[in-house]
Amino acid sequence: MYQTFYQLRGKPFQLTPDPGMLFPSKGHQRAMAYLLYGFEQGEGFVMITGAVGTGKTLLIQKLFEELAHRNIVVASLASANLDGEDILPAVASALDLPYERRSKEALLQDVKQYLISLHARHTHALLVVDEAQTLTPAALEMLRILSNLELKGHALLQIFLVGQAELRRIIVSNHMEQLRQRIIASHRIEPLGEEESRAYILHRLHAVGWNNDPELAPEIFAEVYRDSRGIPRKINLIMDRLLLHGYLEELHSLDLAALTMVLDEMHEEMAGVPPTLEAPAMPQNQELPRATATVEREAKLAALELKILLRLMREEVRLKRMLRTGPGPLPASATDDAAIVDMRCPRSSRE
């Protein structure tokens, strides 16, 4: 719509990843360097993480372009809550191998024989797993087993894990030491800084032939950065809506007032949604009450445990006294409490 009005060759802020539009931020350049380094090693895992919308998938697509001239077979897998039983058929499917009605052992042998055939042709095999934070620990363990496949000391398969920050927590919290030791390179993509955010916007505009139409007021860049928090996908959303607003209002100059109107509309449409693209574990307005309720519940449980412990200790005192004096009712008294204190205190403290 607005492309013709502003005489642009294309849509500068489309959400669909386009390697030709990749902005070479410092973070993305560093991530690409880690990917290429890891690829040259030809073994183990390379892990790339980052918040939603920071350009991880776009980076991987750019990597594929960089490797296009290499003798390589790339299998791409967009995981969706795959567990230990699902991951091997998914890998076989990504490698164009039959997987239906095949046992796990048979699939493992099929994959290994296929990788051996690639190795014989001096072809590198790379498996890229996107959204890897949705994998279960069992699925990650199966990937580690696949990464162990080798022939005469040469790894047959290299694996790139791409996902949100949760991926790191999954690997650490599940004590996956063997997998961690096979990660030869790792990088977290951070949101853009304010200056990079401005450069990103201009980069995308110039890529489609922008000739200062519409003219952008200088304060727009700082406000877009503030509202987007430097996340490229959210910058795209805001700028796309701003250009659409300019087209509908037939504006060839966009100022802060126009941007404010657009942001107000977007916030109204997304009322109640957390300000960050990575939603918290619980709604923000429920965090404090739920945390308070958790503390209160734990306090009640602790009090109950103490009450049960004291009751058991009193019973122990009563039974010991019965063994010394013979059977008979023993009324509860302060003597029992004194005996309990005596049992709980170390001998050194009583002497």
Image (spheres, grey):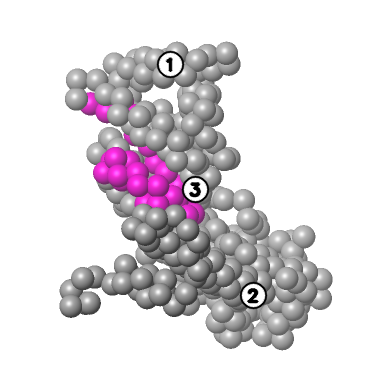
Q: Which residue is mark 3?
A: 133
Mark 3 or mark 1, whichever is nearer to me = 1
Vertically, is 127 above or below 236?
above
**Residue name at image x 77 percent, y 74 percent:** 268
| Label pair 2/3, CB-CB below 8 angstroms | no
Give the x, y percent position of residue 131. 52, 46
Q: Amino acid at mark 2?
A: Pro
Residue 105 can be seen, yes or no: yes
Q: Which residue is mark 2?
A: 289
CA gap between label 2 and label 3 equals 28 Å
Q: Which residue is mark 1?
A: 105
Q: Quadrant of the N terminus?
A: bottom right
Residues shaded magenta: 154-182
Sequence-wise, which precedes: disc 3 or disc 1?
1
Q: Amino acid at mark 1?
A: Glu
Q: Nearer the viewer, residue 30 or 306?
A: 306
Q: Amino acid at mark 3?
A: Gln
**Residue name at image x 78 percent, y 69 percent:** 269
Mark 2 or mark 3, whichever is nearer to me = 2
Q: Judge whether residue 5 is colored magenta.
A: no
Vertically, is 214 above or below 28?
below
Element under disc 2: helix
Vertically, is 137 above or below 6?
above
Q: Nearer the viewer, residue 117 or 140?
A: 140
Residue 22 can be seen, yes or no: no
